[in-house]
Structures are given as C-alpha cells and as structure tokens.
Amino acid sequence: MTVVADPPPMTAGPDGVFRVGGTRVTLDTVVGAFLDGASAETIADQYPSLELADVYAAIAYYLRHRAEVNEYLARRREQAAATRQRVEADFPPEGVRARLLARRNQPS
C-alpha cells in the first residue's frame, strides 16, 4: 500500500465561492451544518449530490485550517449582508404582500 495525499475536494468558482466535490454545494453550507452539530453522514444525506468522502474531506480541511476558513466565512457573511442591503434598497421588503395582492387583482 502506498499512502498518497488527496487534494481537498473543493474548487473556487469565478465568484470566489468554494464548492465541495464538484457540486454546487458550498463550503459554507458543509461547515455551517457541521458546526450546527450535523455529522458527515447527515450532511451527505441532506445533499445527495455530495459524496460522503468529500464531506469528510471538507470537514477535515476545515479542522486543519480553521483560522483561514473562518476568515473566508466571515468575508462571505459580509458579502451576503452587503448584497442583502443593496437588494432591499432597490426592492424594499415592506409592503411586498400588499403589492403582490394588488398585482393579482389587476385585470390582465
């Protein structure tokens, strides 16, 4: 038997978002579920496109590079908050239900 180190099963897209195992599932999602107490098996069950081995590898990467991954996750949270602010400024959430109901009641 020869021991060979496999690279982490993660790729960064053009948007800088890391995805696990060649899927659309983000590293944020896997690490978040793990930190919420989900086992690798539970995460793989919740996201059938993920291979169990890739979930374990992503968790192992997180555990070995906690500070770096936490910084990445913090940046992602900041980006999400900024995006939410821009969207809510352009499309205020207040009165959405009333606007939708009014649109439904308009003649075609």
Image (spheres, rainbow, N blue to C red):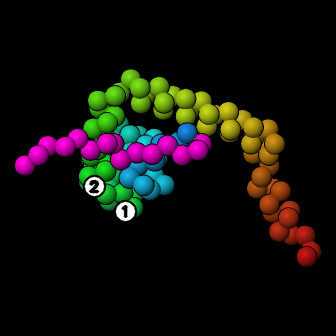
Q: Are marks 2 and 1 in contact (CB under 8 Å)?
A: no
Q: Nearer the viewer, residue 64 or 32?
A: 64
Residue for point 37% across, 62% down:
48
The kind of residue tagged 2 is Leu
> Is residue 14 found inside the magenta-colored segment of the image?
yes
Chain part drawn in magenta: 1-15
Query: At label 1, which amino acid type do we have?
Result: Pro
- The kind of secondary structure element at disc 2 is helix
Q: Quadrant of the C terminus?
A: bottom right
* 18 falls in the magenta region: no
Q: Nearer the viewer, residue 24 or 13?
A: 13
| Residue 28 x %, y % | 45, 41
- For the point 77% across and 52% down, the residue is 96
What is the residue that sits farthest to the left in this orientation?
Answer: 1
Q: CA distance from mark 2 to mark 1?
A: 9 Å
**Mark carried by residue 65:** none
Classified by dominant secondary structure, the portion drawn in magenta counts as loop
For label 1, the SS is loop
Q: Quadrant of residue 36?
A: top left
Mark count: 2
Q: Which residue is mark 2?
A: 52
Q: Which residue is mark 1?
A: 48
Viewed as shown, does residue 53 lie left or right of 95? left
- Would residue 37 be visible to someone looking at this image? no
Is disc 1 surrounded by few (<14), some (14 to 19) or many (20+) residues within 10 Å?
A: few
At 31% from the left and 42% from the top, the residue drawn is 7
Left or right relative to 48: residue 18: right
State the image coordinates of residue 44 (x, y, percent, origin top left). 32, 56
